[in-house]
Amino acid sequence: MLPGVPPGQAMDRDFIARNQIVERYIGGRLPLKGAQDFERFCREHPELVDEIALTERISAALRLLDASGRAAPWEQRPKQWWERLPVLIGTALLALALAVTCLVINSKQSARDRTIASLQQRLATLPLDPAKSTRTITVVPSRTGPSARSLVTIGGEAQMADLKFDVSWSQFTAFQVTIDRVDQGRVGVLHNLQRDSNGILHLELNSTALGPGAYQLTFEGMTWRGEAVPQAWATISFRH
């Protein structure tokens, strides 16, 4: 424990010099009682400040801080880059933009879910009109890729459409047919359809079974491993 002023002994210049009070005070190594005694002595004897060259000591300490790149004690600590106002404002704006984006996406998702539910309800309750006739239609699908041009239009009055797709050129005998409504979504997938001896795939349906619009059919040959290999495409339209 560093000594304070012993009881019965007043702090004087000799005591200050002998016990290195100035150095200990500046270094923060004096006990509380010793620091209070030294401060009281300086108030009573202000000339001591000049005698101990306190101003020069402080100037030297400040020069040392400046040389080491440290700020003076009374100077404000330099802010880190994340504490600066432009960064804080930018972060707040980014958070606001993300929140607005999430709200917009959530709103669109909810609207889409409501639309899908409405379409599903309409499809579930859509009545089928009894077919009054049968129409046989031969379709030669494209081998090069999907086409926006409709190969045939079915509808008007309710009828059974007997669609015959010519895939006689294909090496496959079993096919998977995927039906997509153009610009809307998937209608269904027909598995393991077998072509007949003339290389024709048959698909017969009521013309009122599907809503009005264009539908793209994708024909994929099935390997013995169960892999689907694209073979042909055809677009057909329905009108009511």
Image (spheres, grey):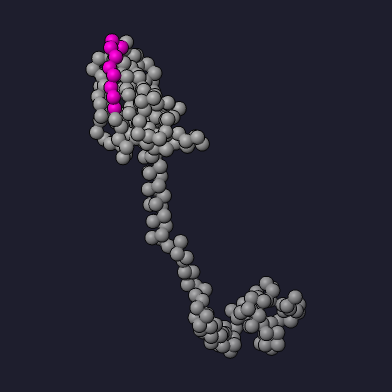
Looking at the image, the residue that sits furthest to the front is: 197
Q: Main secondary structure of the magenta part?
A: strand
The residue sitting at 39% across, 30% down in the picture is 178
Residue 165 place in picture, x, y as percent: 33, 27
Residue 202: image x %, image y %? Answer: 36, 23
Residue 213 visible in the shown view: no
Q: Report the residue at 45% width, 34% height from top.
A: 222
Residue shown at 70%/84% (left/top)? 19
Which percent across, then down, holds residue 88?
A: 42, 57
Which image quadrant is residue 154 in?
top left
Q: Position of residue 46 (x, y in %)?
A: 57, 83
- Between residue 174 and residue 126, name the one nearer to us: 174
Point 33% across, 17% down: residue: 206
Quadrant hosting residue 105: top left
- Left or right: 21 with respect to 225? right
In the rendered view, tell whether residue 126 sits above or below residue 144.
Answer: above
Nearest the camera: 68 or 6? 68
Q: Quadrant of residue 37?
A: bottom right
Residue 201: in magenta span? no
Q: Is residue 19 above or below residue 155?
A: below
Residue 158 lies left or right of residue 50; in this view the side is left
Q: Is residue 135 magenta?
A: yes
Q: Which residues are magenta?
A: 131-139
Q: Nearer the viewer, residue 127 or 157?
A: 157
> Is residue 175 visible from the viewing direction of this image?
yes
* Closer to the camera in the image, 224 or 96: 224
Taking the image as shown, residue 63 lies to the left or right of residue 98, namely right
Q: Quadrant of the N terminus?
A: bottom right
